Image (cartoon, helix red, strand yellow):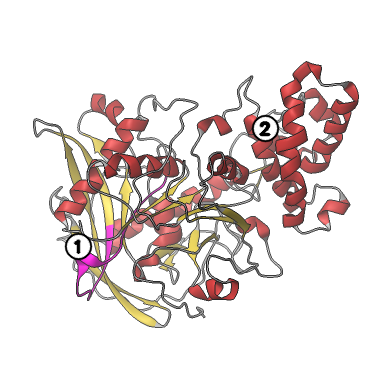
Amino acid sequence: MTKPRPCFPATLAAFWVMLVAGFGSAAPAEKPASAAKPGAKPDTTAPVVTHHLIVVNGKPLAYTVAAGTLPLKNDQGETEAEIFFMAYTLDGVKSPAQRPLMFSFNGGPGSSSVWLHLGALGPKRVKMRPDGAMPPAPYQLVDNPYTWLDQTDLVFIDPVGTGYSRASKPELGRKFWGVQGDLESVAVGEFIRLWTTRYSRWASPKFLAGESYGTTRAAGLSGYLVERGIAFNGIILVSSILNFETADFTRGNELPYTLYLPTYTATAWYHKKLPAELQQRDLSSTLAEVEPWATGDYARALALGDKLPPEQRAAVLDRLARYTGLDRGYLDLANLRVDIQHFCKELLRSERRTVGRLDSRFKGIDQQATGETPEFDPSLAAIRPPYTAMFNQYVRGELGYKSDRVYYILGGGILGPLGIPRRERVAARGVLEEPRHEAVRGLGALRSRHALLRHRLHARPSPARAGRAVPRHDPSVRGRAHDVHRRGRAREAQAGRGGVHRRSAGDEMSGLLILFPAVGLT
């Protein structure tokens, strides 16, 4: 039974979000869909429109879904690409132009928006096992009682080369596959402007929700679009990457090793590979010990390189072994530096298992246990089949959108170099004076370690407002980095304004919530 959720303010100045793996929900009866004729070819100017009903918090919620594409044209009026979107709008709203509007996308680059769409925000979700693992087929699509649709209209965007979105000619693809081209096309700039215009939503309070590289996109869009008259009331960042230098394991760049270490610790803690003294403590207190050492003594040791005295090197090795669960001799051979792929392979090598990169709680089995890095990501392997199957079934069967194109869930549609500089940095601006930037990160998400965002956002703190990082945990909702749901204001009331209610027990791998009431992210 779904617990009641008090309503949030209509302005949506704040969202409470956390990571989860699955939500249980019974599927109520649904209104017959008023779709286009079966087999009809979708028109780029006329989306397929259907009407539906879901029960949220014990109340029926009638809504409309529009699935279609919008053209991106050059100055000569020639269509260079088509962007596929799925828009959810609440029915019975007296003034739709005043209702909050959220644009959402995932990252990659090369990912469709399906993960936030059917894993977190939309009125439907893919049903996974309680621990987030892949269920056996037939897969199920069920109602999502935690959908954000009761608070805001939702528009899910697939950038060029993802989902059904395509460049009109193969050679035009590279125009959209770079940092600036991506902003201008998804605009993610131009799309947002065009959709806002066609659906008369210029007056609506606007929000962005991005995941992984989508957080890079969201930060860049806030600056790109404000110059075109579109400012955002708030931005939500899930599994953030705002400074690519923090994730670039290259010679001479020591930053990733220090920022990944707390996530290595969280992973080792989950798999019970830490010393008994640390395993008996809760994860929060363990991380409180690890984080200052990682950015302090460990960072200084790496900076010294060969000048590090032998006795200090020995002390650092002892600490690394303590905090990572890895063999001290291995760490010595690795010269105190272990990148993400080697960690995923080494942590459970004695068990002939690997850990996931998207979610390090997942275990994999490689054909060769002697390899240096994993042969595949078990966390990605667990989610791709059910999400792929259920999206295709949903869009064609329930929504009536017919297309023979491959829906590129993650990868496959970008046919050239991405053109993203290794050390690209982005900063968000162009948001209103009182927005709340919220960033969500799973403590077990190795591809987007939780210390990275904290480092980036505290590099230049606002003198007037400071962000706070608060671990979130809940034994009933274990999570993946792309699975997000919002809790009601009851949590806010228990902790006081701006606070977070913490349960006394649970799985702290489920996420990290960082609140930023500051104006910008620079």
For the point 20% across and 53% down, the residue is: 196
Q: Residue 30 at what x, y percent from top left?
A: 31, 75
Q: CA distance from mark 2 to mark 1?
A: 49 Å
* Viewer-nearest of discs 2 and 1: 2
Q: Look at label 1 and name its amino acid.
A: Val
For the point 64% across and 47% down, the residue is: 360
For the point 69% across and 66% down, the residue is: 506
Q: Residue 471 at what x, y percent from top left?
A: 63, 58
Q: Spot the residue most to the left.
A: 76
Identify the secondary structure beneath mark 1.
Answer: strand
Label 1 packing within 10 angstroms: few (<14), some (14-19), many (20+):
many
Q: Residue 169 at what x, y percent from top left?
A: 21, 29
Q: Is residue 112 above or below residue 118?
A: above
The image quadrant that residue 39 belongs to is: bottom left
Q: Which residue is mark 2?
A: 257
Specify start and end residues of the magenta stretch as a single range: 87-107
Q: Which mark is residue 25?
A: none
Say which of 246 and 380 sits in front: 246
Q: Spot the residue most to the right.
A: 311
* Left or right, 51 with reference to 343: left
Say which of 205 and 62 sits in front: 205
Q: Is residue 91 magenta?
A: yes
Q: Residue 24 at what x, y percent from top left?
A: 51, 71
Q: Earlier in the sequence, mark 2 or mark 1?
A: 1
Q: Look at label 2 and name its amino acid.
A: Tyr
* Left or right, 49 with reference to 434: left
Q: Which residue is mark 1?
A: 49
For the point 56% across and 39% down, the residue is: 459
The image quadrant that residue 57 belongs to is: bottom left
